[in-house]
Amino acid sequence: MHKVKLLPRLALDGIRKNGSSYIPYILITAFSVFVFFIFNAIFENPMMQNMPHAIYLLGLMLLGVILLGIILLPILVSTNQFLIKQRKNELGLYNILGLDVKDIGIMMFIETLILYVVTVGLGILMAQVFSRLIFLMLLNMAHLDVNCEFVATKQSYMVTLIYFGVVFGLNFIGSLWQVGRAKPIELMKSSKKGERQEKGLLLKTLLGLIILGCGYGSAITNEVNSKIFLNFFLAVFLVTLGTQLLFKAGTIIVLKKMKCIPKLYYQKHNFVTISGMLYRMKRNAQSLSNICIFSTMIMITLICTVSLFKDETNAIHFTYPMDVVYEFEADSFEQKEALNEQIAALAHTYQVEVKDQVALEMQMLAVLKEDKSFVENIDRDWFLDNSYRLWLITLEDYNRMTGSNIQLGEDEVLIFSPTKDFGDSTVYLNGEAYTVKEELMQFCLENKEPRNLTTSNYYMVLSNKEQIETWAEVMNATASGNRFYTVAFNLEGEQVQQDAFIKALDEWSMRQEGGTVAGYIGDWEKDTRSMYGGLLFLGIFFGLIFTVCLLLMMYYKQITEGYEDQKNFKILKQVGMSDEEVRGTIKKQILMVFFLPLVGAIIHTFVGMTMVDDLLTTIHVYNRGLILACSIGVMLFFTVLYCVSYLFTNKAYYKIVK
C-alpha cells in the first residue's frame, strides 16, 4: 500500500485502538475549548461595552481568559506526554517494519491534525449550543439586563483556534522529539527501562520542608495591607514547590526507612506494599503532587465562592452604613432648611420613608500619620501608606447627631478610626498635644473593621468650631472643597420608588450652589453585585475546570498504574499469592498512594485559611465564623467527591490488570 494512503490509515487506527486513552483526552480538550471559547466570546462581545456596570465583568473575564490559558497549557501538554508514552512500543514496531522517522513524524502530524480538528470542532459546537445559557447565567449572577443577544465575534474564534493550534503544535513537537531521538529498540523497551537512582534525596527533602515551611509561614503571618496579593502568590509558589520536592524525595526517604526495619518490612503484606509504593513514588511523584495542588486549588476556590455567595449582602452594606449620604460645600451651600423640606416633600411624593436622618459639618485635613501624631500632608500625596483624611467635627454636631451629652475641655478630643484602634491616650496635631477622652467604637458614616483596607479616614471631635477653623488655617485647608455639610439617612420603601426619590433629590441638589450628587447604596449595590456576580461566575467555572482537570489526572494515573501492574499482578500469582491477597495488596498500595495527595491538600487548605480570610476582606467579607463553616463544609464535600472519583477511575485500573 502506498504511504500516502497508509499513513492516514495508521493515524486513525492508532487513535481508535488506543481509545481508552484517547477518548478522555478528546473530551477534556473539547471541554477546554468550550470554556476558553465561551470566556473569549463574552469578553469580545461588543454588546458588553454598552452594558451598565459591565466594566467589572470585562476586567474579570479578561483575567479569566489569561488564567485559563496558563492553567490549561501544562495539563494538555502533560496528558499528551502520557499518550505518546503509551504508544512508544507501537511506534517502535512501525519503525522496525519499515517506516522511517520521517514517515512516523508525518503519521503523528496527521494524528495531531485529526485530534485538533475533532476537539476544537466539538468544543466550539458545544459552545454554540450552551453559550446562550451560560451568558444568561453570567448576566443573572451579575444582576444585569438579561434581554441581550449573545453573538460570538470572529476574534473569539480566531483566538481559540490560534491558542489551541499552539497547544497542539507544542504537543506535536514534544512527541516528535521523544520518538525521533530514540532508536527503534529503545522505543520497544521504553516501558521496561529502569529508572536512575535519585540523588540528593535528603537534601531535597530538607529543602522541600524549608520551602513548604516558608510558604506556610507566609500564609499564616500575612497581614492585610497593600501587598496582600503579592504575598498570596508568593505563598502559593512556595507551597507548590515545597509539595513537589516532598513528594519526589520525602516520601521515598520515608519508604526506604521503613524498608530498613526488618520486623516491619519482611512480612507478606508489608513487603509487597512497601516495595510497590516505593516503585510508584519514584515514577509518579510528579503526578501525585499535581493532584495535591489541584485539590487544594479546588477547595480554596470553592471556599471563596461559597463564602462570598453567603455573605454578599453584608459585604455590600458594609460600605454604606447609611443608605444615602449627601455632601455639600459648606462655604457656599446655604439651603439647609430647604434641603430638609425637599427631602420631606419628595419622600411624600414617592412614598418612601426617611429614617435616622443626621446632619453635620466636617472639616477635612490632608494629613500624614506618624505614630500617634498627625502632620500636614504638604504635597497632598494620597498614595503614601500613612496618608489620611482627618475629618474634624464639633462637639455640638456630634452630640446632636448621636443624642448624647458629652463634655470636652479645649485640650480633649474624641477620635474614631474605621480600621485599627488609634490606641493611645494622647494625640498630636502638628505637635500640639490633645488628650483622647474616648476612642469611639462606632460612627454613623463608616463601619469599623480593623482589617478594612479601603478607607483612609480618621474622625476627630473637638470642643468648638473656633478650634477647627484654627487647625484648618494652620494646615492650609481653608480653601473651598475642604469643608463639607453632610446629610445622611436611611430609606424604606419599594426599590423603584427609592431610585426615583434619589434621582429627583439629585436633580434638586445639583441646581443648588455647592450641591453635589449623593452617595447612594442603590447605585453601589448595582456596581458591587455586578462585580461579585462576576467573581461568583469565575469561581464556579474555575472550580469546575479544576475538578475536571483533577479527574483527568486521576484517570490517567489509574491507567498508568494499571499498565504497570499488569505483569506484576501475574507474577504475584505465580509466586503463590491468591487472587484475593493480590487484589488486597494492590488495593492497599493504591489507596495509600492516592489518598496521600488528599491529606496534603487538606493540610494546605487548613493552613491557607488565614490567607483566604485576609483575601476575602478585600471584598468586605469579614465574617470569620461563616468562612470557617464554609471551609469545613467544602473540605467534607471535596473528600466525598475525591472518594467517588477514586472509585470511578479505579474501575478502569482493574479492567486493565485483570
Image (cartoon, helix red, strand yellow):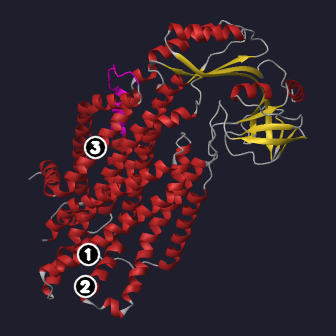
Label 2: how many Cα within 10 Å (few below 14, some 14–19, many 20+): some
> Is 159 covered by the magenta stretch?
yes
Q: Which residue is rendered at x = 64% and y = 33% of the image?
A: 446
Whichever of callouts 1 and 3 sits on the residue coming sooner in the sequence is 3
**Position of 303 relative to 120 (above/below):** below
Q: Secondary structure at mark 2?
A: helix
Residue at mark 1 = 588
The answer for how far apart the CA atoms under marks 2 and 1 are is 9 Å
Magenta residues, start to end? 144-162
Q: Identify which amino acid the numbered label 2 is placed on.
A: His
Q: Looking at this view, is 80 or 657 the one in front?
A: 657
Q: Which residue is rendered at x = 54% and y = 53% of the image?
A: 611
Whichever of callouts 2 and 1 sits on the residue coming sooner in the sequence is 2
**Position of 125 relative to 101 (above/below):** above
- Can residue 311 be seen here? yes
Question: 297 left or right of 349?
Answer: left
Q: Looking at this view, is 361 or 169 the one in front?
A: 361
Q: Identify which amino acid the numbered label 3 is placed on.
A: Phe
* Disc sitting over residue 31 in the figure: 3
Task: From the top left corner, tell me how far across and down residue 419 is, in percent.
Answer: 67, 42
* Disc sitting over residue 269 in the figure: 2
**Position of 517 relative to 534 (above/below):** above
The answer for how far apart the CA atoms under marks 1 and 3 are is 33 Å
Q: Secondary structure at mark 3?
A: helix
* Disc sitting over residue 273 in the figure: none
* Placement of the C terminus among the 4 image quadrants: bottom left
**Position of 224 relative to 187 (above/below):** above
